[in-house]
Amino acid sequence: MELRHLRYFVAVAEEENVSRAALRLHVSQPALSRQVRDLEDELGFALLHRSAKSVRLTDAGRTFLGESRAVLKRADDAVAAAMAVATGRTGELHIGYAPTPTSRLLPPALRAFQAETPEVRVKLHDLSTEEMVRALRERTVHLALLVKPGRALLRGLKFVSILTDPVRIAVPPGHPWARLRKVPFERLLSEPLVVYSRKDFPEYHEFLDGLFAQHKRTPVVASEHESGASLVAAVEAGYGLALASRSLACSIGARLKLIPVAPEPEPLVIGAAWLAEGLPPVGERFLRCAKDAAKAV
């Protein structure tokens, strides 16, 4: 017994006429009659009383009609549900993200995505770069929004750039540099810096080390921090200054001043990473929303 047998039987039962049912199904009348008789032969009992011009249900046929409709509806529902997942219109999406660098990108991307796919449940995971890469490989997140990692961390992953974020020097409001329009980079060479943890944010240290190497120096690190919140608090407390992305302004308000550096360092590249084998359709939908959102940032 196949689903088509049930569809043929339901059409004949509803039309109460084989010819009309055949027209509805776009099949020949002899073929339709044969399929319904094959179904009855397989079941071992009659479903229809037949006359020259019409058919009517037997008692068994009436019961079988209700059950057949239920089976067909369940099959249609199963196809629709699977299609929604296959096209990224429903399901669950896990996104790893770095709060500070993505603060300008993530909110508009999420708004656009939720408007387009309201049936998808999005779960956000605030993680360090190392944690995001590990989560991707362990398949606990589908997609990660982060500062572009080094080549070693990207092994087995794909990365696409979405936007760039200028680098600024973060200082307390009362610091002598707070009123400057720009800070010459040479003045940073001996300045104690508050930085992100090398273990959790290796790409930040690659950037920092490369920046100072151009002046044949190494940064003077006053303290390392595992999050943007603790880094901001350390700068406020006077532990040192911090080189950070301009997006930090979204979360600090008036707590710190962000001053451009001269000459302007290369901006940080913010993008999305995922397993090289590919994104699920729901992830592809979100990535498109993120790219569109970046155009307005």
Image: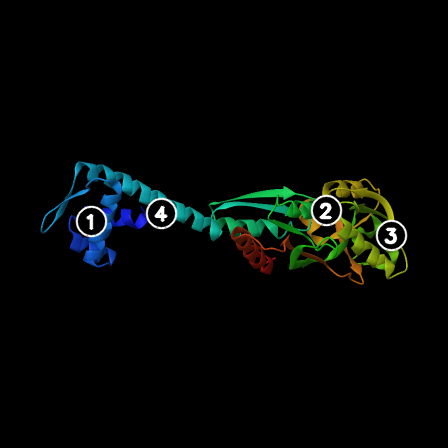
Determine the secondary structure under disc 1: helix
- Observer-nearest of 40 and 147: 40
- What is the distance, in whole Å, between disc 1 and disc 2 at their CAs? 62 Å
Q: Which residue is mark 3?
A: 219
Tell me which label, 3 or 1, sits earlier in the chain. Answer: 1
Q: Amino acid at mark 4?
A: Asp
Q: Which is nearer the N-term, disc 3 or disc 4?
A: 4
Amino acid marked by disc 1 = Val
From mark 4 to mark 2, how far is it between C-alphas? Answer: 43 Å
Q: Which mark is residue 76?
A: 4
Contact (Cβ within 8 Å) of mark 4 with mark 1 = no
Q: Quick one: SS at disc 2?
A: helix
- Closer to the camera: disc 1 or disc 2? 1
Q: Position of residue 243 (x, y in %)?
A: 79, 52
Q: What's the mark number on residue 130?
A: 2
N-term mark: 3 or 2: 2
Question: What residue is rendered at 90% in x and 60% in y?
Answer: 216
Q: Nearer the viewer, mark 4 or mark 1?
A: 1
What kind of residue is marked 2? Glu
